[in-house]
Image (cartoon, rainbow, N blue to C red):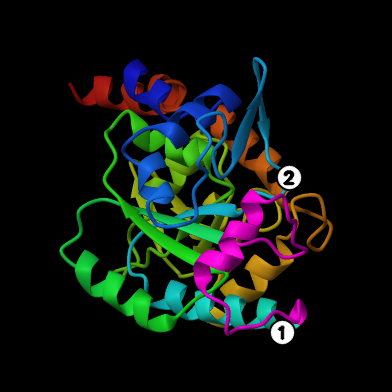
């Protein structure tokens, strides 16, 4: 139990830099035109002497789960809206727009990079669909990460996107708990699902607390709105910016470690049965 808990925890800057350079996903970015060529820097971090620093012009890194249909619709909306807001030439190639980041250019609305992990049988279908969308300011990359690297990815991301829904309404996405454990705020689909856990019921809006540790959405347009509001990292979204949501996620994760929950709630009840 303790080793599982320690898996999902906040990622240090040194760990973010190291995992961004790792062959499993650092090279995946550089070979697709949006990575950094210098071994002392990545798309997100740079090394100055012995210090690791976050790049102020880095793209927002997001990691989604489940069905991607609603996410792809939101990505198209974000891409088109940002093009209009920044008055950018949509005829430019994707790699040109992303290469400007390496040159130090900063944007009022950040580029978005979604990392999709796992070996889904739908992977090729979604990759082909993403290509046809012709997105310029939003990029998707699929990666297979080891069990050790996956928590580091969550800890390196700016935002988690939870697309989980339940037709029976009797479960909650436990990946959200993993994300909170890594201090990652979450945008989640709002639905009437509840988790029946031993003698208690937890609803989605009790897990993801709006404007505290994340945001909820029901439509792709609402998710696109939230992605626009969460820019840039210092600005506020209805009183709570991304930094504030991250602080809320860190607080949620630190107060709900599985080891503590096990000892306090689950273990006594199971001991009674046994």
Where residue 181 sits: x, y (%)? 50, 34
Which stretch is magenta?
Answer: 85-111
Q: Can residue 219 be seen in this snapshot?
A: no
**Res 197 quadrant in image:** top left
Residue 223 relative to residue 243: left or right: left
Residue drawn 36% across and 83% down?
A: 132
Magenta: main secondary structure equals loop
Give above or below for 252 relative to 127. above
Badge number at residue 191 = none
Real-space CA distance between mark 2 and mark 1, rounded to the nearest whole angstrom:
23 Å
Residue drawn 20% across and 53% down?
A: 119
Q: Secondary structure at mark 1?
A: helix
Where residue 63 sits: x, y (%)? 45, 53
Q: Is residue 95 magenta?
A: yes
Q: Is residue 25 magenta?
A: no
Circle 1 residue? 84
Residue 186 relative to residue 273: left or right: right
Q: Quadrant of the C terminus?
A: top left
Residue drawn 60% across and 74% down?
A: 224
Circle 2 residue? 56
**Neighbourhood count class around disc 2 (C-alpha, 10 Å): few under 14, some 14–19, many 20 upward:** some
Q: Quadrant of the N terminus?
A: top left
Q: Nearer the viewer, residue 254 or 262?
A: 254
The numbered mark, 2 or 1, whose residue comes first in the sequence reads 2
Q: Nearer the viewer, residue 38 or 241?
A: 38
Where residue 113 sits: x, y (%)? 51, 58
Q: Nearer the viewer, residue 123 or 168?
A: 123
Residue drawn 53% across and 50% down?
A: 207
């Amino acid at each position: 139990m303790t080793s599982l808990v320690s898996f999902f925890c906040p990622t240090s800057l040194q760990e973010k830099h190291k995992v961004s350079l790792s062959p499993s996903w650092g090279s995946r970015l550089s070979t697709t035109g949006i990575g950094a060529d210098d071994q002392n820097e990545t798309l997100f971090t740079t090394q100055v002497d012995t210090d690791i620093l976050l790049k102020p012009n880095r793209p927002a890194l997001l990691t989604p789960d489940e069905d991607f249909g609603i996410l792809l619709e939101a990505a198209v909306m974000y891409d088109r809206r940002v093009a209009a807001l920044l008055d950018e030439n949509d005829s430019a190639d994707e790699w040109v727009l992303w290469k400007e980041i390496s040159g130090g250019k900063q944007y009022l609305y950040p580029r978005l990079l979604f990392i999709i992990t796992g070996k889904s049988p739908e992977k090729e279908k979604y990759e082909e669909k993403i290509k046809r969308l012709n997105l310029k300011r939003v990029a998707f990359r699929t990666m297979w990460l080891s069990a050790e690297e996956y928590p580091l990815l969550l800890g390196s991301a700016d935002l988690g996107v939870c697309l989980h829904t339940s037709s029976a309404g009797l479960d909650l996405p436990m990946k959200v708990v993993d994300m909170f454990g890594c201090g990652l705020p979450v945008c989640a689909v709002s639905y009437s699902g509840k988790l029946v856990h031993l003698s208690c019921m937890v609803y989605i809006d009790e897990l993801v607390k709006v404007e505290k540790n994340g945001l909820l959405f029901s439509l792709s347009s609402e998710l696109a709105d939230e992605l626009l509001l969460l820019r840039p990292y210092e600005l506020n979204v209805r009183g709570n910016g991304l930094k504030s949501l991250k602080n809320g996620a860190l607080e949620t994760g630190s107060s709900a470690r599985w080891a503590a929950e096990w000892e306090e709630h689950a273990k006594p009840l199971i001991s009674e049965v046994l």
